[in-house]
Every structure is written in C-alpha cells, then in structure tokens.
Image (cartoon, rainbow, N blue to C red):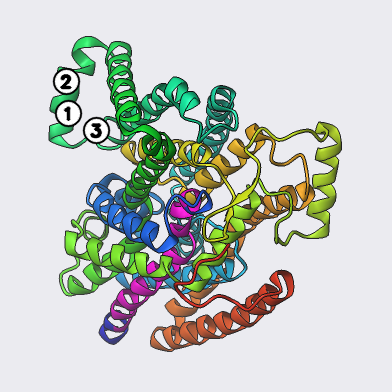
Amino acid sequence: MFTFLGLAALMGLGFLVWDCVEVGRNDAANLVNAVFGARALPRRTAVLIAGAAVVLGATFSSPVMETARKGIFNPAALTIHMALAIYVSVYFVDTVMLYGFSGFGMPVSTTACLVFELVGASLFLAGPANVNWAKVGTVVLGIIVSIAVSGVASFLIMRVFRGAIRDKTQDKETLLLHGPWITGAILTGLTWFMVFKGLKNVPAVKLLKSHTFQTYGDGLVLLTMWGIFTLLAHIIVVFTHRRGSRYLFHVTAVLGMICMAFAFGQNDLANAASPGLAGFTLWRNSKNPGDLADIASKIPIPIWALFGCGVVIAVGMMTRYAQRVTRAEVNTGSQFDHVALYAPEWCKALARVFIRLRGRGPSLAPEPELSDRGKKIHYDTLRASVITAVSGSVIAFASGRGLPVSTTYVAFAAVLGTGISDRVFTRGDADVKIGRAIWVITCWFLAPVIAVLATGGIARLIYHLSALGLVLGILLNVSARHVLKRRADAHERRYHHTPAPQAGEEVS
C-alpha cells in the first residue's frame, strides 16, 4: 500500500506540471486572443504580460481552491487509497482531453473538465451518495449564468460604444469627443469588479471599501470614479495629440487582458494545481491520516507552488497548439469576410438557417485591414477592450464569490456577443463562423460526458490494480495522446493548407 501511495503521489506531482502545460495550451491561450486579434501587442509580449498577471492572481485564489478540492465530493467518506486514485485519474484524463482539444484548435474549459472529472472518479469509486450534487449544480449554474451575462453584457456594451465611435477608432476628433467617457466606463468597471468584488476579502480592500462605498453609496462612488477616469483620459488625449488618440483603446485592451489574466489566476490555476498538491499532502500524512477531509482540503497551498504553476502555464501558452486555439477563436469572431476554419456540415447547415432568419446586412465594424507587418487585424481595439473588460469583470466577480467559472466560456461568449453587435456574422463566410461557434458549444456539452466516463473508468482501474493500474493509466494516456496528435496534425494540414508554425511563431 505504501508503495502505491508514494508512487501515486509523485506521479500526481509530475502530472500536475504536465496539466499546467495543457492548461496553458488551451484555457490560458484565450487570455491573449482579443489583444492579439487586434494586433495591440505581439503574441509573445502579450503572453509574458498575461503570465505575470496569472501568477499574481493565483495568490488570491483560496476560496475557489476549496470549491475544487472539497466541494465536489466528500473526502471524509474515502480511504487514502481511494482519494489518491481519484486525484491521479483526474490528471490522466485532463492532460489528454486538453491536449486533444488544443490540437484541433478547440477552446474548452479547464474548470468544467476538472469538476466533471472529479465527479466521474468519485461517482465510479464511492457511488452517487459521495458526490455533492448540490455543489455540482451550483457550479454548473454559475458557468451557465456567467456565459449568458458575458454574452449579453458584451453585446449591449459593444452596441453603445460602437454607436458612438462607429468605425472611426483612429480619428482624433471622434476620440476626443467619445474616447474619454468610454475609457472611463471601462476602467470604472474593471476597478469595481476586479478590486472591490474579486479582492473583497483582502484587508486593505475591505478598509478602502468601508470608507468609500459603504459610507457614500455605490452609485455616488462609481459616478465619481467614472468622472475621474474620464477626465484623466481626456487630458491624455489632449496633451499627447495623435499618438494618444491612436493608442487609447490599445491601452484599455491591454489593461483588460491583465485583469482577465489576474482573474484567471484566481480561478483556473489553483484548480489545476490542487488535486496533485492535495494528493501529495495525503501521502505525507499517510501514517497519521486523521481527518481525511481536513488533510485534503484545508492545508494551505504555498505561494512558491502557485508561482511555479503559473510559470509552466505561461510556457504552455507559447506552444504551437496554443496558437491553434488562438487562431481558431480569433477567426470565429473576425471582421474579415473569409477565414480558414473547420465546422461540420450539419453545423454550417444550421448556421445558414440562422442567417436566413436574421438576414444579411452591412457590418458595423471597421473595414478589414492589415497591420504594418502584413497580418490580419481581426478586431479593432475598441472591440478588444470590450471583450477583455467584460470577461475579466465576470470572472473576477465569480472568483470573489468562490465560484470556479470558465474563463474559456466567458471569453468565447464575449467574442460572440461583440461579433453579433458588430454584425460580423452577416457577410462572407458567415456560415463557417457561426457553424464553428455551434461546433465549439456542442463540444462544451460533450466534454463533461467524456470527462465523467473516462475518469471513472481510469479511477477504478487504478484503485483495483494499484501500481499496475498506474502503469496502465500512463500507457493509455500516451497512446491516446499519440493518436490525437496524428489526427490533429492531419486536420491542420487539410483545412489550413499550410505547414504548422514553429513554436513561438505568430499565426495570422
């Protein structure tokens, strides 16, 4: 038994690192999509900045980590052998699922996969009574609501901002008139949700909030913040002349990306790290196990461990498969008429029905253009600012309430919401873009089913065969990974007709 426990704990730590790479390939890749699609920053620069924000956000992730480790199932009803089998099987399946989705350029939620992998493993090993179905329902409802809020909010905000700016995002007179109040609104929203909602448990924030919002009321303080930010933006535009007006929304887009990455660190990074670290803690206390629930869920996770995980995630964001995820999501919401995307025929047929019902018409987005380096500019910086600001605000608000919502789902909903607002799905390859969105959302519903069944089977294999089960789990993981890589690379060559870019090379 001790041999199995030690081997499982060490294997869990190894797969923790591997899983962080896969999180970087897929989920974290969504952090830079808006900024990269607008060409506000080179992808490598955006990844480095977002990676630093992810690490910082992870230090404030404790409420979410308790939800991921203890809330989904009851560790007190398990043996240590059973608990370690659950934690390791989660990583065996998660690394394969994320790798496969990334290879095909499909964004998927790390949070949703992890939650349903925990459900599947505990369900197959300890039965339905061990699963906290109320907590699972709360998490699922939180994810669904966050998607709806992100999509609707991004649509409405984008329609208001676009109505003021139109396609004149580089015109100084237009930006002097409307740029400051739009910038003020974005910065006010980010400050409110990121600081006073996402970090509401920080003592300094509590003190500041008691002297402002609780004293003078939310409405007055928010209006004052908006006025201050608007005035500062107006001064910047006036005194920096054309350069200030040209890069005004570049700045808000990058700030939104930083806030979104910070919120991601609060949510997803800690969720990915907690099973491996909890399993290692169980092994260290295997001779004096005591209360398994306390050991598995209440021990603090050291900052250095979160820092290391954040670095590994940033490395994963720079890989070739991460660029496939970025390219696919950016192309789905692109203002260009023609894009290179895959969608099944039934998805495109359903998309054409939607197009006929809605009708085709002129786009509200600026005319498509190329950057100075000849790269497609898929979004203008105003739209990128709305995508990152709404996504970051929704994730930060959920994190402050201890709910592990999906960064991927929220960000994708914001891309679709702003795209519908700008009417980018009414011309050109609209059936391909909408079809791709339908296919992505369909896979969101398939992923939990795969996660439950696969993790449940692997958990039983490991539990009953012990060390041999671990070896078989690794063999299944590597074999599935090999098959997925071969098929994903063939898919890439078939639908994009270009050699796959090397690691670190930008995609258009």
Quarter-of-image position of residue 481: bottom right
Q: Secondary structure at mark 1?
A: helix
Q: Which of the marked residues, 1 or 3, is nearer the chain's N terminus?
A: 3
Q: Amino acid at mark 2?
A: Ser
Determine contact: label 2, label 1, CB under 8 Å: yes
Could you tell me what secondary structure mostly forms the magenta stretch? Answer: helix
Determine contact: label 1, label 3, CB under 8 Å: yes
From this view, report whether residue 29 is shown above or below residue 353: below
Cα separation between marks 2 and 1: 6 Å
| Residue stretch in magenta | 7-35
The magenta stretch spans residue 11 = yes
| Nearest the eye: 48 or 401 | 48
Q: Which of the marked residues, 2 or 3, is nearer the chain's N terminus?
A: 3
Residue 319 visible in the shown view: yes
Q: Amino acid at mark 3?
A: Lys
The magenta stretch spans residue 467 = no
Q: Which residue is denoted by mark 2 in the rendering?
A: 210
Quarter-of-image position of residue 317: bottom left
Q: Which residue is denoted by mark 1 in the rendering?
A: 206
The residue sitting at 30% across, 50% down in the picture is 66
The residue sitting at 59% across, 80% down in the picture is 485
Q: Secondary structure at mark 2?
A: helix
Give the image location of residue 363, x and y in percent: 71, 35
Q: Amino acid at mark 1?
A: Lys
Residue 271 visible in the shown view: no
From this view, report whether residue 490 is shown above or below residue 249: below
Give the image location of residue 44, x and y in percent: 40, 64
Q: Which residue is denoted by mark 3 in the rendering?
A: 200
